[in-house]
Image (cartoon, grey):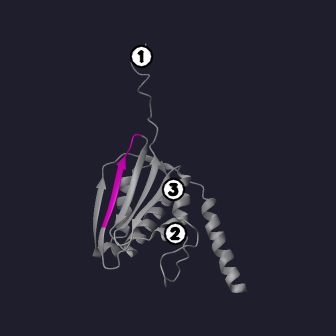
Amino acid sequence: MNASQHIYDMMYRIQGQTQEVVLQKERIVPADVMHECLRMLAPELSGFEVREEYAYRGAMEADRAQLVEVWTNVLTNAMEAMPQGGVLIVRMTETKRKIVVEIKDNGIGMEKHQLKRVFDPFYSTKSGKKMNFGLGLSYCYAIVHKHKGTMNVHSKPGLGTSVFMQFPKPKQQHDNSVEGKG
């Protein structure tokens, strides 16, 4: 009982640390950072077809190290959902006010009851995995929210999963509406 309580306390502290993260923001090009993540994961990605679709190639203010951690985590989850290999699509698009990042796999997908708990600390759909404490997506969710973004997961059993992250677009450096008046 003492050992279980110790492990729970330790995991609770680890999870609590994600709430205390202070972002070190800098101007980054998210498409370049995502491409770096894919390059770092290249050995693990050898059995997958990877498609990169970067319609948005602009910049944003973000903590590069934290985003690398988030995207690497989501990409790793996608690979683990496709044990026999498959198609991994990474997309960046934009709306009027948001930068939209999508990481999509054609893996095993998730049931509705799993989807509801996907961001809960200590929840995992992976069985028998050593060192899997179910903190990955909880951490990712916290970091995306610290960037004033949102994170959503869409999934259907047998049809794969899409993870959507939306970040605010950077404000324009100068206001065009004032120019030319006077």
Q: Which residues are magenta?
A: 88-96
Q: Residues within 10 Å of mark 1 (few under 14, many from 20)?
A: few
Quadrant containing the N terminus is: bottom right
Q: Residues within 10 Å of mark 3 (few under 14, many from 20)?
A: some
Q: Which residue is mark 2?
A: 136
- Distance of label 2 from label 3 (alpha carbons): 12 Å
Q: Amino acid at mark 3?
A: Val
Give the image location of residue 123, x and y in percent.
55, 73
x 70%, y 80%: residue: 5
Q: Is residue 51 left or right of residue 120?
A: left
Q: Is residue 20 left or right of residue 134?
A: right
Of marks 1 and 2, which one's residue comes earlier in the chain? 2
- Residue ranking furthest to the right: 2
Give the image location of residue 115, x and y in percent.
48, 67
For label 2, the SS is helix
Up/down of 138 relative to 59, above or below: below
Nearest to the eye among marks 1 and 3: give it.
Answer: 3
Quadrant containing the C terminus is: top left
- Residue ranking furthest to the front: 112
Nearest to the eye among marks 1 and 2: give it.
Answer: 2
Q: Which residue is mark 1?
A: 181
Give the image location of residue 108, x and y in percent.
37, 74
Q: Amino acid at mark 2?
A: Gly
x 60%, y 55%: residue: 22
Of marks 2 and 3, which one's residue comes earlier in the chain? 2
For label 3, the SS is helix
